[in-house]
């Protein structure tokens, strides 16, 4: 990611228009960064993990997010993967961080996606809405 010749991820944050953006390095074989985007006037928070395995630091990074897009490529039972979250991990992070809406993205190409969503919802509890990403689907915060 480059911005006017500067490497974005080396900055602690960026101010772009009405947004404040911070970055967190993730666990993945290829360098990847999560982004936390805050709309300054409303305080609304959007977090995107990018590709990543589980990191406890995601709990603080996603704290009180209105919308959390989580790289959820694996079903429960595959925890501590080196590159991707499981449904259980995504749900647990969302619950611990008091996230309002968790959207599972980077979905597996095999298996029952409704089961993946159920596993995440079970881990997230009743207070977190859990959805699956889909082409053309829109989420408002």
Image: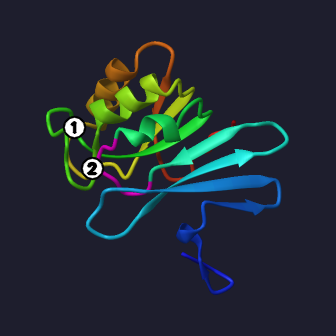
* Viewer-side residue, 111 vs 79: 79
Most distant residue in the top direction: 126
Badge 2: residue crowd in 10 Å (few <14, some 14–19, many ≥20): some
Q: Locate the C terminus by quadrant.
A: top right
What residue sits 30% from the left and 37% below the top?
A: 113
Q: Main secondary structure of the magenta part?
A: loop
What residue sits 34% from the left and 53% below the top?
A: 52
Badge 1: residue crowd in 10 Å (few <14, some 14–19, many ≥20): many
Tag 2 residue: 108
Horizontal placement of 16 versus 115: left or right?
A: right
Q: Are marks 1 and 2 in contact (CB under 8 Å)?
A: yes
* Viewer-side residue, 114 vs 30: 30
- Residue 52 located within the stretch drawn in magenta: yes
In the rendered image, the vertical position of residue 32 relative to residue 113, given as above or below: below
Under tag 1, what secondary structure?
Answer: loop
- Residue 3 located within the stretch drawn in magenta: no
Q: Where's residue 132, x and y in %?
A: 43, 38
What residue sits 47% from the left and 47% below the top?
A: 134
Q: Nearer the viewer, mark 1 or mark 2?
A: 1
Q: CA distance from mark 1 to mark 2?
A: 9 Å
Tag 1 residue: 75
Question: Quick one: label 1 or label 2, which is nearer the N terminus?
Answer: 1
Q: Where's residue 96, x and y in %?
A: 43, 24
In the rendered image, the vertical position of residue 55 relative to residue 17, given as above or below: above
* Magenta stretch, residue numbers: 50-55
Q: Locate the N terminus by quadrant.
A: bottom right
């Amino acid at each position: 990611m480059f911005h006017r010749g500067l490497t974005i991820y080396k900055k602690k944050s960026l101010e772009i228009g009405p947004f404040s953006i911070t970055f967190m390095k993730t666990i993945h074989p290829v360098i990847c960064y999560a982004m936390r985007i805050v709309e300054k006037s409303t305080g609304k928070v959007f977090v995107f993990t990018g590709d990543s395995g589980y990191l406890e630091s995601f709990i603080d990074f996603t704290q009180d997010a209105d919308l959390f897009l989580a790289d959820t490529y694996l079903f429960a039972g595959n925890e501590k993967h080196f590159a991707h979250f499981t449904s259980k991990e995504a749900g647990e992070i969302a619950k611990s961080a008091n996230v309002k809406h968790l959207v599972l993205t980077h979905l597996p190409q095999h298996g029952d996606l409704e089961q993946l969503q159920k596993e995440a919802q079970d881990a997230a509890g009743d207070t977190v809405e859990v959805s699956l990403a889909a082409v053309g689907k829109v989420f408002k915060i």
